[in-house]
Amino acid sequence: MGAMTAVKVLKILLIVTSHEQMGASGERTGFWMEELAAPYAEFSTAGAQVDIASPLGGKAPADPRSLGEQSEVVRAFLADPAAVKKMENTLALEQVKGTYDAYFVVGGHGVMWDLAAYAPLHKMLGKEWDRGAVVAAVCHGPAALVGVKDKAGKPLVAGRRVAGFSNEEEAAVKLDKVVPFALETRLKELGGNYERGPMWKSFAVRDGRLVTGQNPASSAAVAREVLSALRER
């Protein structure tokens, strides 16, 4: 009898913000629940091992506005004790051990303040990209990519198709004067080939191992593109 070949379990790291203040506005923010729940569901259903990490570790803050009218996928996540435990006990990014097949940055306005400027994450994503991992982000998540460079020292997004929360959407939620920078503008300034669809509709872009999405509605589509990229490796 031949030995059974072990099926390799995919390992995927979801990265969330630890930041819960909306600039100087006094309003609360954090990560966007749908953007954590939808990828978690897609990846778990695909049989992947999914971990959640944040800069500070411990309980990550969900944007209160994202807990309002809950979609089915959010309700399912919050009803799953294992998922909730990971969200309330996130790994500290600087203590993440080993490597993952894919790294997925969850959006939410908090990212604009901490992950956009968090060098340890930029270094990790640059290194993992060079190693061959899939790098993904949705909505404001691509703000975490603005500081990521490849081994040649070039911005990761330069010359690549990329999506992210649009300037039009930021103005529509009246936070264009609150955020530290306009994400769409910054991605273009870094040489990214920015693409978008209609406001609030699902829009995901894949350029090789880089997968990005425009808004919360794009979360599941980005996750599915990540799985496609992993299958092609």
Image (spheres, rainbow, N blue to C red):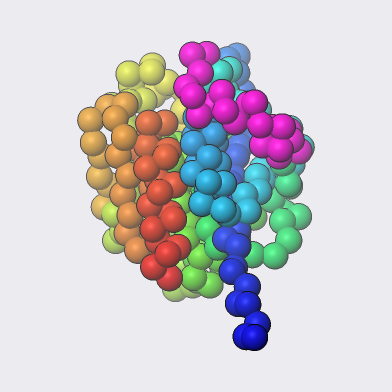
Residue toward you, 146 or 39: 39
In which quarter of the view is residue 12 placed? bottom right
Residue 130, percent across and down? 50, 71
Q: Is residue 72 magenta?
A: yes
Task: Report the side of 51 relative to 173 (left or right).
Answer: right
Residue toward you, 26 or 11: 11
Residue 174, percent across and down? 38, 16
Residue toward you, 221 or 30: 221
Q: Is residue 206 magenta?
A: no
Question: Is 121 located above or below residue 107 in the figure?
Answer: below
The region drawn magenta spans 68-89
Question: Is 6 located above or below residue 86 in the figure?
Answer: below
Task: Report the side of 71 relative to 204 (left or right).
Answer: right
Dominant SS of magenta comes to helix
The quarter of the picture where the C terminus appears is bottom left
Task: Report the side of 195 relative to 26 (left or right).
Answer: left
In which quarter of the view is residue 170 placed? top left
Residue 92 appears in the figure: yes
The quarter of the picture where the N terminus appears is bottom right
Q: Residue at x 39, y 68 (%)?
A: 232
Q: Residue at x 51, y 51 (%)?
A: 46
Q: Residue at x 29, y 54 (%)?
A: 161
Residue 60 appears in the figure: no
Residue 199, percent across and down? 27, 27
Question: Is 147 located above or below residue 209 in the figure?
Answer: above
Q: Residue at x 43, y 54 (%)?
A: 226
Residue 99, percent across and down? 64, 64
- Residue positioned most to the front: 1
Number of labels in the image equals 0
